Amino acid sequence: MGREVVRKRLTEVFRDVFDDDSIVLTDNTTANDIEAWDSLEHISLISAVEKEFRMRFTMKEVSGMKNVGEMISIVAERAKK
Amino acid sequence: MVFSSLIFLYAFLPLCMLFYFLIKPLKGKNGVLIVFSLLFYSWGEPVRVLYLLLSAVVNYFLGMGVSPTRVELKKDLSTPTLRRKILLAVSLVFNIGMIGVFKYSRFVVTNINGIFGAELPVPDIVPMIGISFYTFQVMSYVIDCYWEKVKPQLSFYKLLLYICLFPQLIAGPIVRYSTIAEEIDNRRSTVADISTGISRFIMGLAKKVILANQLYRIVDSTIGKNDISGLTILGAWYGVIVYSLYVYFDFSGYSDMAIGLGRIFGFHFNENFNHPYLCKDITEFWQRWHISLGSFFRDYLLPIPVFGIRNKYTSLFLVWLCTGIWHGANWNYIIWGLYYGCFIMFETALGKKRIAKIPMLIRHIYTKLVITIGFGIFFFEDLGNLGTFLKCLLPTNANGWSDMTVEMLMANNLFLVIAAVICSFPLVDGFKKLSQKSENVKSLVSVSGTVLSVGLLLLSSVLLVDATTNVFLYWNY
């Protein structure tokens, strides 16, 4: 799946999880840029992304993703729909 | 050995520093720290050091085993090989299993005997002081190797130094390998490091000896009595509030001493406390209290899908159940962990935005109430006593509002308790800000800081000569 398609759909997921329609995702977006993105909401986010793209993240990825760019790469490679 | 003892202050530490700073090569310095750390751990119970060494050897090999080999690295595999997965499982079973054997076997067997009427022999095992702390450290190392966040340490002595370093060995902070990996190989203590480290150590010592130990006498005369059925409402509240202050000064004092000692030897550990009683919600309390344990669970436990499901509430349940269990082999700790879990789930469900709208005064009253009653649960290992105590807090307490003994106790310790409350605020940060105003103020603050440190050290030493209660609360963990 193309990175731009992933980014577009991921933006919707982020807006939904963090209840904030102003979110715009770049590759460099991190948890510091989105106020509501803490370690707990991270779990909700991961779960929502997994549902949206019908794929699974590993524990290492859940705990170690540095920014949205990395998330897009993983999703682009592994997304099932 | 404990930091707040005369033998540590006036023999162990000066000798360790003497050898450390006399020897110039870093290899020698690391050697001094290892020798002194093993001596520190074996003090009073030499057999303990054998298990520590066993854990270091096993995890040394496992750390290398769970890391990708050069060939695997070249292939750039997206998932770890079966060998790495199996060895990770072995490390988790070994480390958690060992904590289980040393810390929980008695509890588990007693409960099995109680519930099923079995007559299994209750094991009598030497308690491994600090096992929960250093085992969590070494587990974080192995998992980080598996996740390729750190490179495995090829030198056994350097890994042993990380595991057994006496400042943080027995009561935290839980230092991550990545925090000090570089400093093991490359560090120096400047005069500023040594002086900051010593002041920080003395501050922690004073928190322990001058505040915590003295506060504990009040606890002993109120909720710590053998028979608490006569507690009045004021007695129960006063006792548990003072106990909450005691736990804070005891444990954060230990962390201050650990961080200060680390600094003397050129190590920079992360902070473990950040004025927890200033918190405005319970979630924030745990971001300020025992930070290294919270971040351990955040990084290694929170991402685990419980029964295959990723959900923040199931993850929270797991984290708080484990937080409870980690704190001790007794039901009250499990209740205590889940009690906090409930409040954090409640706050999560309410959401940050709605919490922010609640008036600040109400938020402070709510958090302090939850924390204080929480420490009541934490204090009473006997659930019958816990029930009696909780009933004593209520206005329906048949013993009445107050009694002479409590009023005398409050009057006699008025200044101590006021001092303790004041010291829960970020005073040092205040002085630091003040000293930025001008050079004159800076030198004044610096001189008063030195005088204060010397004074606190002398006063602590005098109190230690006469000490009866001096064991750290957290050192059995």
Image (cartoon, coloured by chain):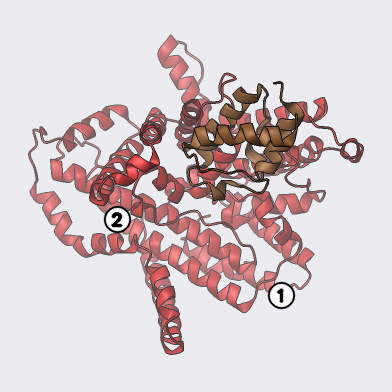
Chain colours: A brown, B red
Residue beneath label 1, please? B22
Residue B134: give x, y in percent of width and height: 61, 45
Q: Residue at x 10, y 32 (%)?
A: B396
Residue A31: give x, y in percent of width and height: 57, 46
Residue B404: give x, y in percent of width and height: 8, 50
Does residue B308 show up? yes
> Which chain does tag 1 point to?
B
Does residue B125 show up? no
Residue beneath label 2, please? B215
Q: Residue at x 47, y 35 (%)?
A: B323
Mark 2 secondary-structure assignment: helix
Which residue is nearer to you in this view: B387 or B348? B348
Residue B107: give x, y in percent of width and height: 47, 26
Task: Please rate how many residues cluster around mark 1, counting C-alpha atoms within 10 Å: few if below 14, some from 14 to 19, many from 20.
Answer: few
How many numbered discs, if any? Answer: 2
Amino acid carrying label 1: it is: Leu
Amino acid carrying label 2: it is: Leu
Residue pushed farthest bottom?
Answer: B440
Q: Is residue B223 left or right of residue A23?
A: left
Task: Please rate how many residues cluster around mark 2, counting C-alpha atoms within 10 Å: few if below 14, some from 14 to 19, many from 20.
Answer: many
Rendered image quadrant of residue B303: top right
> Which chain does tag 2 point to?
B
Q: Residue at x 60, y 47 (%)?
A: A30
